[in-house]
Image (spheres, rainbow, N blue to C red):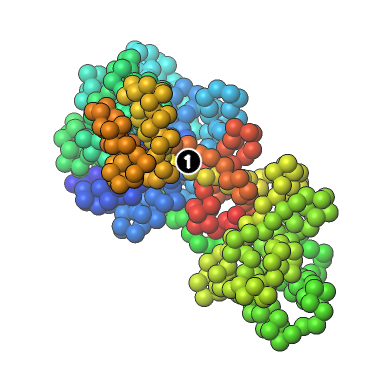
Amino acid sequence: MSFVHLHVHSCFSFLDGAARVEDLVARAVELGLPALALTDHNGLYGAVRFYKAACSASIKPLLGSEIDVQGGHLLLLAKDKEGYSNLCRLLTILHLSRNGGPPALDLDSLSAHSSGLLCLSGCEKGEVASLLRTGKVKAALEAASRLKDIFGDHFFIELQNHLLPYSSSLNYHLSQLAHHLGLPLVATNNVHYLKAEDYPLHELLISIRKIERVGQSKPPRLNAEYYLKSPAQMQRLFRSYPQALANSLLLPQECSLELELKKPRLPHFELARGEEPFGYLCRLCWQQAQEIYGSISSELKGRLEKELKAVKELGLASYFLIVWDLVSFAQKRGISYSGRGSAAGSLICYLLGITKVDPLAQGLLFERFLNENRKELPDIDVDFSSARREVVLTYLYQKYGKEQVAMVATLITYRAKNALRDVGKTLGLDKESLDHLAKALPYISAERIPQAVESLPELDPKEFSSPKVRQAVALAGRLSGFPRHLGTHLGGVVISPEPLTDIVPLERNAQGLVVCQMDKDDLQEVGLLK
């Protein structure tokens, strides 16, 4: 008998998951699992790359999230497209409604957006399990009844067995509660790392998050059982609950979600009645060509026709007009801006005033920016004066609606300097020594620190020779590339033809701006253009 893990955290649980999504998928293949879920805390930050990795490995991907609700944790899995959109909306409500404290979703919001979702009662921090652990059986029954009212047959009582002193007793009481309410059981492992030997790495991440020394947590941490176990291991752990095991295989069969990757979701540029975007773009370009160049040479004509053909083939006319409208607004308001990157190779961008370098005069290639044969969407980078950027953003919100405009995220990942600093703190290295060592390192990936110490003359190997520093270097290398937190792309804005929360969860950054939970690469995968 096989098994499917439905409760899985990756490094996208930000300092509470110690496995890369690609490694989780590879391990699932080794274990012969037919499907695998990704349920990171309060977000879908790694959903796209997990989905792609799973599909490439012929593993069925299940997308979900362990969400903080009033009362505790709750696990939600998207059954279908409607469920995925509702999950995005719930996560957005969760993040945008927080007022300084930890986010917590209310049951009214959960009820309003429950369609297409499977709900599991959560880990020991879930409301039902927490109440049973403290002997509040009646309150636990009431909490489970409320969730049953919301999700009906799609609500499951979650059993976990991490071999803790209370695990068997808690599972017995959970099963009794499920029987009393007529609810199905499902077995899960609260996966936070790949293998048992990765437990110290998870410990390290939690210590970093809580800003405390490794091994000095009070109360002490749990054990090393929170990993991706084999089907045989899970069957031994839950031999008293065969239906809970069987349901781990039945739930994935209810899920039919397929992400529409690479399908462009391009915003429409509104024009006067009777006008259509491509015709308007052509007229603008030819008019500007006449005005800038005076006469239309055969080279100019051929180049512009070629570019316009590519734009038409890919249906990008509205995209170019939106950027043109934005820079036109900036020009009228006296806001300085600069188009940069591969867009400088586009004659259309030059004619529209998006870029300021003549690609014909400079011999720049359009194909570096846009190639109709590759069918890849372009990326027009325009930097606006930081002092007036808020004015530009306000214009976008007013023109296209707050539901369809948001900032693009960046993932702040661990590299040599920040990894060594964070690890060193948890190991008790003094701040002065840490600062000195981190400043001495070049801007490299963390796993390359030992190589850099050996090969770079500006680094003194003696300074990295003490046992504690060597330990810090080794552990820092294991964090290389792990996301530390979500950042905001300085100039990245995405505009959607539909409400963004149909496609991606949103949250608020430290400055109060609304940001997508995906970076520009993942947004492009789901068809949204930066």
**Farthest residue, direction bottom:** 298
Task: Check the image and report above or below for 137 versus 484.
Answer: above
- 175 or 168: nearer the eye? 168
Amino acid type, label 1? Ile
Vertical position of residue 491 compared to residue 358: above or below = above
Side of 125 where 26 appears, left or right: left
Mark 1 is surrounded, within 10 Å at the Cα level, by few (under 14), some (14 to 19) or many (20 or more) other residues, namely: some
Q: Picture coordinates of residue 318 (x, y %)?
A: 69, 64
Q: Position of residue 180 (x, y in %)?
A: 34, 24
In this rendering, does residue 232 appear at all? yes
Left or right: 293 as drawn, with respect to 339: right
**Residue 43, position in %: x, y?**
48, 39
Helix, strand or loop at label 1? It is: strand
The mark tally for this picture is: 1
Q: Residue at x 53, y 40 (%)?
A: 487
Residue located at (61% from left, 49% from top): 492
Q: 137 or 515: nearer the eye?
A: 515
Residue located farthest toward the top when viewing the structure as drawn: 135
Q: Quadrant of residue 436?
A: top left
Q: Which residue is mark 1?
A: 412
518 or 115, which is in the foreground? 518
Farthest front residue? 457
Q: Quadrant of the C terminus?
A: bottom right
Residue at image coords 19%, 32%: 237
Residue at the (61%, 45%) spot, across then down: 490
Residue 343 location (% of width, % of height): 62, 64
In the rendered image of this protein, does residue 28 appear above or below residue 98? below
Q: Would residue 40 be visible to someone looking at this image? A: no
